[in-house]
Image (cartoon, rainbow, N blue to C red):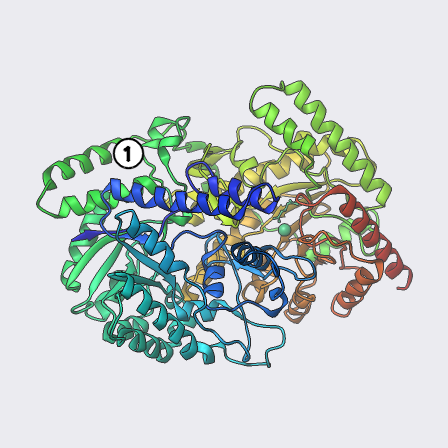
Amino acid sequence: MSTTVLGYPRIGDRRELKRASESYWAGRSTAAELDAVGAALRRGTWESLRATGIEQIPSNTFSYYDQVLDTAVLFGLVPPRFAEAGAGRPAREAELERYFAMARGCDGAPAMEMTKWFDTNYHYLVPELSPETRPRLVGRKPLSEYVQAKGLGIETRPVLVGPLTFLMLAKNAAGAPEGWDRLELLDELVDGYAELLGFLAAAGAGWVQFDEPILVTEAGTAVTAELERAYDRLGSLAERPRILVATYFEAPGARALEVLKRSPVEAVGLDLTAPRTLEVLSSVAGLGDKTLYAGVVDGRNVWRADIGAALSVLTSVLGLAERVVVGTSCSLLHVPVDLDAETGLDPALRSRLAFARQKAAEVVLLDRCLTDGGAEAAAALAEARAADAAKPPPGFVDQRVRARLDALGAGTARADYDRRRRAREAAGAPPLLPTTTIGSFPQTDDVRAARAGYREGRLDRAEYERRMRAEIDRVIALQEDIGLDVLVHGEPERNDMVQYFAEQLGGYATTRYGWVQSYGSRYVRPPILFGDVSRPEPMTVGWTTYAQSRTDKPVKGMLTGPVTMLAWSFVREDQPLAETARQVALALRDEIADLERAGIRHIQVDEAALRELLPLREEDRSAYFDWAIGSFRLATSGVAETTRIHSHMCYSEFGQIVAAIDALDADVTSVEAARSRMELVDDLAAIGYRRGIGPGVYDIHSPRVPSVEEVEAALRTALGAVAPDRLWVNPDCGLKTRGYAETEAALRAMVEAARRVRASL
Ligand code: GLN
Ligand code: ZN
């Protein structure tokens, strides 16, 4: 047997990559300095894996921004608008400048689109392809990283995004003919990979890993002919490293697995933490003479492996392949680097956790348990760990929460929407086309400094509150001056829309250094939801009612919904997600009741991650919708008929979830639409959605200030599908990453546009 991991965090123990890249972008360091940090981070990873005892170490898992972007650059797939980026600079500078321009945009060339990597919170850059695109190998990154490791005496397995996954995750460029199939580029692209394999073989590489997670989706399973062609070609090369094709995040489709089994590749990687995988593997009668890379250590969650269970899975696959390599279910990119840094966590909770470094050690431990040398000692260690992890951390079980949920059942349904609407109209007719925002206002340095000062004990509670209130005063006054109709307090007290609540809820723990890359230099610290969720105290009522006390206009309360609270946390696995979502919903239900009691009449429950948690397999989707919708309704159904529940979702690919948006039964839903030309509005109209809708009228992801005419045009487009008494006017997401100057100008344009459209109705 042998051991491996499919990938590793690239950000460094102390976010070194973030610091280095941001300093480079700001012109404070040189390309050589940035490259030196990159080289040191790679070396650190390889050496750490080697010290842990991992035998097969991956390389090319490092990236300055994203592995899909790296692949596009490797094959010269640079959209034409970036052709001039970096021109005239020395070679390495020019290369980096163009690379970062693709990721972040540059003068006159908007960045490439970014979207979520499968059902994770990692974002990749979407390659743009057209019939004119000519993929060919122009880069050497996987080779040079392999050579760097070799120079350090470390043999590695370069990791590549596989050709099918790459093409299917790309999109057709703006000018590509309607219906053009990107898979037409497959053969040319595979030629490029073939050339690369030749170089790797010449440099001495024994193995290469092709990541093909697309094979776990229905779309991926549908392209078996292409899969066969690609790997037959790569497998039949005379000079090449041995090939591992890794699938993960779910079981691959049986047909795809059949093809891989027939193909000349030497090894297949399977995610054995997915419940279906063993079944699929048995259905094809195992891998025959191939090697199975058995992903038994979960690469996506932070719980320690159940060594006993993992051993029994390993034992059951031993007969299904010629050889078995123990490994992780996917790259460890999705978990924090090192648990040892978390000295502040409760010891009983800590003993249940494993981050990337600990997961690599688990792989090694599993291997030792199965092989002769050290098997006994390893088994004893595994047992001691199990005993340790069996002690529940404080707050693990909350009988009161469980009893209340049992008593509540599905929660009460709200009155019919038309009835709610009439009740509200009787209480005072709302203006047509009401203007509002999504919640956050720009987070200034002062606001961040105040939060940091309070957290680190330099500011006492009274001073902190004084500063936050001063900020709320400013934000309320600004909104009144601009003429918005439904105001917000601006969320200055929130570092993050999930962490803020997690810090106040029972059953949740937060980490100090538990950073995970979300995209580029943006990392998040997902909180750990380990036990029953309870709400010891109101979480937002103080700030919201303070804001309401400063204005006669209605102030909208702001909460994060159950699905999003789960999606952006590491969640317990000892009970179904549905149950955990209900516990979060109950806490929100209590918060909403308190807000209402305090006189708040608009309450927004953000479900930014509703789309993200959509299961990869169609057969799992209806169960998902049941609990996702059920928990939202459990949270929001306790309110009076006159209270407006808002929801917000910030992405544009809604195709599969329009019906779910409708089923949430929110009174108003605001969505991202500025970049997607309001398609969603048509989609919602098509299914007969009849409640309030606020399609974002301008894109907050860019500092550009929209003109009044532009916003007006967006509103008139929306009015083509939505009755004027259902249309809300808002930007397409929160404003916290923007500056005040552009925010104020944009909101003024938005309010003026709404006025003009109203006047013309
Ligand atoms: N209310 C949140 C904000 O405005 C919503 C953020 C989001 O949807 N991502 O920041
Ligand atoms: Zn949003």
Which is more toward the observer, 338 or 462? 338
User: At which x and y percent is residue 503?
Assistant: 52, 32
- Rendering coords of residue 238 (x, y %): 24, 75
Residue 223, above or below 533: below
Q: Residue at x 52, y 52 (%)?
A: 630
Coordinates of residue 485 in the picture (x, y in percent) = 81, 46
295 with respect to 331 (left or right)? left
Callout count: 1
Between residues 404 and 213, which one lies in front from this camera angle? 213
The quarter in which the C terminus is drawn is bottom right
The residue that mark 1 highlights is: 389
Disc 1 residue crowd, few under 14, some 14–19, many 20+, Cα 10 Å: many
Query: Which residue is rendered at x = 54% and y = 58% of the image?
Result: 99
Residue 6 seen by the camera: no
- Percent across and percent down for residue 58 are 31, 53
Of the pair 424 and 534, the residue shown nearer to us: 534
Q: Residue at x 55, y 23 (%)?
A: 456
